[in-house]
């Protein structure tokens, strides 16, 4: 059974979120750029991952604005990262979390890092899992990783 879906407000935008677990640590999961809070529970590996996190923490996860159960964004106009990052603050406020560990997963790593740098008073730690500093190679960078 999945947790109830609730909605935080960020201005005129509604951001869908869920809270799972009752641990002493608040852990905000900033996941991939795509997702769906309720549908992910149908994926056994995701269900196990979230339940594992909730065994020691209160997991707060959400669908970013324009994604999943959150309000849709106008076509071809997802917000800039600085605005999108504020979804984390809105969800933490709605869930009653003053401070949390921020877990950035894959493409969510950039957003998580920006939140942690912008709001160090609300961030107890930053965890990056499968995150990258840059999504593609650029001029002056090697064309492959070297050992």
Image (tube, rainbow, N blue to C red):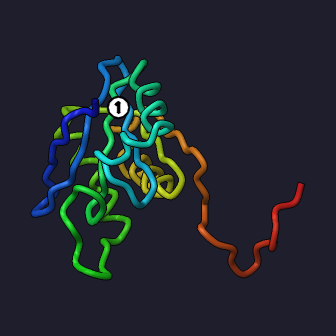
Instruction: Decide if residue 98 is in sight here.
Output: no
Q: Residue at x 45, y 55 (%)?
A: 32
Q: Is residue 45 left or right of residue 38?
A: right
Instruction: Name the residue nearer the viewer: 51 or 76.
Output: 51
Q: Residue at x 27, y 66 (%)?
A: 66
Instruction: Name the residue nearer the viewer: 63 or 124.
Output: 63
**26 in relation to 40, above or below:** above
Residue at the left extreme, as displayed: 12
Q: Position of residue 74 (x, y in %)?
A: 22, 78
Q: Is residue 112 left or right of residue 91?
A: right
Q: Position of residue 83 (x, y in %)?
A: 29, 64
Instruction: Name the residue nearer the viewer: 68 or 144.
Output: 68
Neighbours of disc 1 within 10 Å: few (<14), some (14-19), many (20+): many
Q: Residue at x 24, y 44 (%)?
A: 17
Query: Quarter holding the C terminus?
Result: bottom right
SS label for mark 1: strand
Q: Position of residue 61 (x, y in %)?
A: 33, 42
Instruction: Decide if residue 58 is in sight here.
Output: yes
Corner quadrant of residue 3: top left
Q: Residue at x 60, y 60 (%)?
A: 133
Residue at the right extreme, as displayed: 147
Query: Quarter holding the N terminus?
Result: top left
Q: Position of residue 108 (x, y in %)?
A: 46, 54
Location of mark 1 (residue): 59
Q: How many marks?
A: 1
């Amino acid at each position: 059974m999945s947790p109830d879906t609730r909605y935080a407000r960020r201005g005129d935008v509604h951001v869908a979120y869920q809270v799972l677990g009752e641990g002493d640590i608040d852990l905000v999961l900033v996941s991939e750029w795509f997702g769906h809070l309720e549908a992910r529970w149908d994926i056994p590996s995701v269900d196990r991952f979230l339940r594992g996190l909730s065994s020691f923490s209160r997991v707060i996860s959400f669908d970013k604005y324009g994604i999943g159960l959150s309000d849709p964004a106008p076509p071809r106009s997802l917000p800039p990262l600085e605005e999108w990052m504020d979804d984390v603050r809105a969800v933490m406020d709605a869930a009653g979390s003053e401070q949390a560990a921020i877990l950035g997963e894959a493409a969510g790593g950039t957003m998580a890092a920006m939140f942690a740098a912008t709001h160090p008073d609300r961030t107890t730690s930053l965890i990056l899992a499968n995150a990258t500093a840059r999504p593609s190679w650029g001029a002056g960078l090697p064309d492959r990783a070297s050992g």
